[in-house]
Image (cartoon, rainbow, N blue to C red):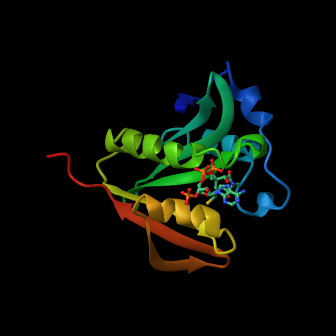
Amino acid sequence: MIELRAITQDNFIEAFNLHLAPGQERFVSHPIRSLAQAYVYRNQCQPFGIYADGKMVGYVMVIYDWDVPEYDIWHMMIDASAQGRGYGGAVLDEVLEYIRTKPFGDSSRVALTCNRDNPLARKLYESRGFAATGVEDEDEVELALTLPDDN
Ligand SMILES: CC(C)(COP(=O)(O)OP(=O)(O)OC[C@H]1O[C@@H](n2cnc3c(N)ncnc32)[C@H](O)[C@@H]1OP(=O)(O)O)[C@@H](O)C(=O)NCCC(=O)NCCS
């Protein structure tokens, strides 16, 4: 249904042109800002364009936190014109498959934060097994899961 493709010199402008719906800017950084962070953390992260039918419809970044250690999912967004078609759930499945390959380090913990006024996203994460950890920072609630062992 969807495909993750690394952001490269061939597609970063498409990521710049993604749009959030009005009011969603407080939930997530735009890919332009996220890609600036990706440059700073370039040895421990992978930004992806989300593709459906060959067109970029969203953006998500996976970053490894050596300190915990854990994988974090940052800045997941689907373009306003493509929301509500089931892409968000499919993206999470693909992102978790990617993290299972342990591209940066050997951790099975996956964490993210979600704004407390974003019940739609929170429900989506909980449907994939994420649960609140009790850690909260201002308006953001941390959710996490542990990937099951492969064997
Ligand atoms: C959150 C987000 C990534 C979800 O992606 P999506 O492709 O729109 O989500 P899906 O189509 O997979 O739908 C997920 C659920 O939300 C519901 N939903 C989606 N859009 C909806 C809408 N506009 N109104 C009501 N429900 C909606 C779907 O019915 C589905 O529920 P279900 O699993 O019970 O059927 C997307 O809405 C988005 O980019 N939002 C703005 C940025 C953001 O909040 N990112 C998350 C940061 S933590």
The quarter holding residue 93 reads: top left
- Vertically, is 38 above or below 69? above
Q: Is residue 68 visible?
A: no
- Residue lying furthest left in this view? 151
- Vertically, is 78 above or below 67? above
- Residue lying furthest front in this view? 85
Nearer-the-camera pick, 45 or 118: 118
What x and y, as percent, mark residue 29? Answer: 72, 53
The residue at 49%/39% (across/down) is 43
- Vertically, is 83 above or below 130? above
The residue at 67%/49% (across/down) is 84
Ligand 1 shows up in which quadrant of the image?
Answer: bottom right
What x and y, as percent, mark residue 124? Answer: 53, 59
What x and y, as percent, mark residue 13? Answer: 76, 27
- Residue lying furthest right in this view? 22
Task: Judge left or right: residue 23 versus residue 85.
Answer: right
